[in-house]
Amino acid sequence: MSAVRELAPSVDRQRILSELRTFARIGYSPDGGINRLAFSRADRQARQVLLHRMRSLGLEPRVDAFGNVFGRLPVAREPDLPPVLVGSHLDAVPGGGRFDGAAGVVAALEVVAAIRQHGLVPRRPVEVVSFACEESSRFGRGTLGSALVAGTVEPEEILELRDARGLTVRRVLELVGLEPDRLALARRRPGDYSAYLELHIEQGRVLEETGARLGIVEAIAAPTRFRLELVGRADHSGATPMPFRRDALAGAAEVILAVERLAREAPGVVGTVGTIRVEPGAINVVPGRAELAIDVRSRDGTTKATVVAALRDEIDGIARRRGLGYALQTLTDEEPVVLHPALAALLERCAQERGAPALRMVSGAGHDAMQMARICPAGMLLVPSREGVSHSRQEWTPPDDIVLGTQILLDAVLHLAEHGVSAS
């Protein structure tokens, strides 16, 4: 590991913070949040800024059919070796924060900037990536760009997903000039990359509570997500006696509480109903329809499956008891992912070399790393989130922690570019 320390230059704090400010201005709203929904105008602007920055650093950029942005550093002693890939995403949830995803892309850019600034010529190429549509906010399913690259989904599985406006993925891609009929070309094979590393904010408060400045991710919990439609009957709220009602919203309330109860009863499981839409939505009308978005997660696939099965039974019972029709659509059903132990060990040793306390942990949030782990060794580094707040304008990570995380990322990338994973 001493070779890492000898090779690695220091990252540039001001350059990192300047890049973060640049991306924070794209999609910024007066209330302080970031609105950069996947494939929106702001998201496309952010990707154009990224392409410009890649070119200025001497990277060879490309954009695939889904809008994933790659930039390869062509300077390498053995350019035909599979590159080390490093990055994250730039899309954001509505009203989100300035660090979620963007911190990882900025850190990846700084890795390349430091290599160029100090005249280093690594053995393997280094490649920066910003994956498209990491957030599930638009289509109810996340990490779509990296899933296509890793081949964990087929194009036909996602092209008919719809957003809140009723637009399909296919139509959105066409509107922004991408190529929905060529998505299969985005796929990469095992061996195309020697490793993938991602820096991300924690989005929880484990690091802050424990006093650790860095988190080394050993596993990523995976979601099962549903869209539930409950159908009753819209009647006059004054003229319809209680025994005659088929209230879809009252049924939805029972489902919401069932999600909470089942998750609380199962160790390591979390359950959330994140959205609810009610029709007709008038104070004097019994709700005739309710649509819920349900998210169940765990690091243990068996436990998660048990909770999901119990929830299906609960929904069926609630609907029968209340005289409601229902349709339950599975949006995604993913397995928890264990990241590469050699990369976790490498990141931990790099942190030790820099005198930084690091904590081995599980990420409860999904990330592109869980997709890339299917085709190459993947590792992930987390930096603290103040009070665990994320997906919010109050999201904050101290600049010193982002700079430290970027330094550890650079150390690890340089080691991998020289020695590969087997020597980690």
Image: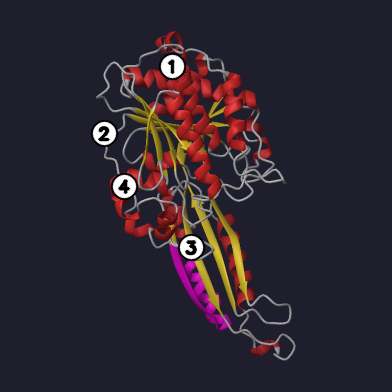
Q: Quadrant of residue 149?
A: top left
Q: Is residue 348 above or below residue 371?
A: above
Secondary structure found at label 3: strand
The x and y percentages for residue 326 are 50, 76
Q: Circle 1 is placed at which residue position?
A: 116
> Mark 1 or mark 3, which is nearer to you?
1
Q: Circle 2 is placed at which residue position?
A: 191
Secondary structure found at label 2: loop
Secondary structure found at label 4: loop
The x and y percentages for residue 160 are 39, 63
Of the numbered discs 4 and 1, the one sitting upstream in the chain is 1
Residue at x 53%, y 15% (from the top left corner)? 354
- The disc label shown at residue 151, or none: 4
Q: Is residue 29 above or below residue 236?
A: above
User: Given the image, on which type of amino acid does mark 2 rest?
Assistant: Gly
Which part of the image, by quadrant, shows the C terminus? top left
Q: Circle 3 is placed at which residue position?
A: 226
Residue 324 located within the stretch drawn in magenta? yes
Q: Is residue 26 above or below residue 156?
A: above
Give the magenta part as a residue range.
307-330
Asked if labels 2 and 3 touch by Cβ distance under 8 angstroms, the answer is no
Mark 4–mark 1 distance (CA, rounded to whole Å): 32 Å
